[in-house]
């Protein structure tokens, strides 16, 4: 069982930033539905300890994030001032760094739990509000920007260096050659 003491303060902060950053990037991927998405972020974070019971590393990480709502509030406020493309780049880079750190210090089960939790947070927020349509009906459930974030996040959490834009460019090059 890996504990907070196994990590430097910077590494621990990075792990917590990824948890919250995945949700705030998902909130800002597409305009509209902010209240539902914010509620989904808080809900995902508050439900997570029960869903990942037995994973002491995640319990410690989540405790630091959920024990003081200002942590999430501050991240939401800061993310509102940052363009989505920059947020996406940051959270993807941080997710890669987090997986590198965790694979060196945590058990495989803890690493897998972290991967699942981060992706679940982003996916929950993305699915909180359909885009477009009237009153949330008949709209696109997941926008292209949101899907791109989810795809890139999944790749980063798996340890892949390729983003969806790079994958599409590679596919385009191969087709056009």
Image: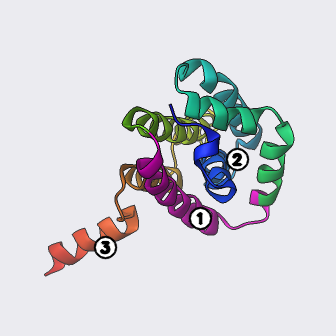
Q: Residue beneath label 2, please? A: 32
Residue 160 appears left or right of 70: left
Of the two numbered discs 3 and 1 in the rendering, the one whose residue sits closer to the viewer: 1
State the residue at coordinates (52%, 51%).
Answer: 146
Q: Residue at x 72, y 32 (%)?
A: 63
Tell me, yes or no, whether the highlighted magenta stretch contains residue 87: yes
Give SS at disc 1. Answer: helix
Marks 2,1: beta carbons within 8 A: no
Quadrant where the C terminus is found in the figure: bottom left
Mark positioned earlier in the residue sequence (3 or 1): 1
- Picture layout, residue 81 above or below residue 19: below
Residue plotted at (44% across, 40% down): 111
Q: Nearer the viewer, residue 163 or 108?
A: 108
Reading the image, the residue beneath label 3 is 169
Q: Position of residue 157 (x, y in %)?
A: 42, 50
Residue furthest bottom in the image = 177
State the extent of the magenta-drawn residues as a range: 79-106
Asked if residue 36 can be seen in this view, the reply is no
Is any atom of residue 103 visible in this view?
A: yes
Q: Residue 23 — which label?
A: none
First reached walking from the N terminus: tag 3 or tag 2: 2
The reply to whether callout 3 and callout 2 are in contact (CB within 8 Å) is: no
> What's the mark number on residue 90?
1
Question: Does dot 2 land on a helix, a strand or a loop?
Answer: loop
Q: Residue at x 60, y 18 (%)?
A: 50
What predominant SS class does the magenta segment belong to?
A: helix
């Amino acid at each position: 069982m890996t504990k907070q003491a196994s990590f430097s303060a910077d590494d621990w902060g990075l792990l917590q930033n990824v948890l919250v950053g995945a949700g705030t990037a998902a909130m800002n991927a597409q305009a509209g539905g902010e209240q539902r998405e914010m509620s989904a972020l808080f809900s995902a974070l508050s439900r997570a300890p029960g869903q990942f019971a037995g994973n002491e590393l995640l319990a410690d990480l989540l405790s630091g994030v959920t024990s003081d709502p200002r942590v999430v509030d501050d991240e939401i406020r800061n993310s509102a001032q940052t363009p989505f493309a920059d947020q996406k780049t940051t959270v993807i880079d941080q997710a890669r760094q987090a997986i590198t750190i965790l694979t060196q210090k945590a058990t495989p089960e803890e690493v897998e739990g972290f991967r699942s939790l981060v992706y679940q947070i982003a996916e929950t927020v993305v699915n909180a509000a359909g885009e477009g349509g009237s009153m949330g009906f008949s709209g696109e459930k997941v926008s292209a920007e949101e899907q791109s974030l989810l795809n890139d996040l999944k790749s980063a959490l798996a340890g892949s260096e390729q983003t969806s834009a790079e994958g599409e460019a590679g596919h385009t090059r191969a087709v056009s050659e």
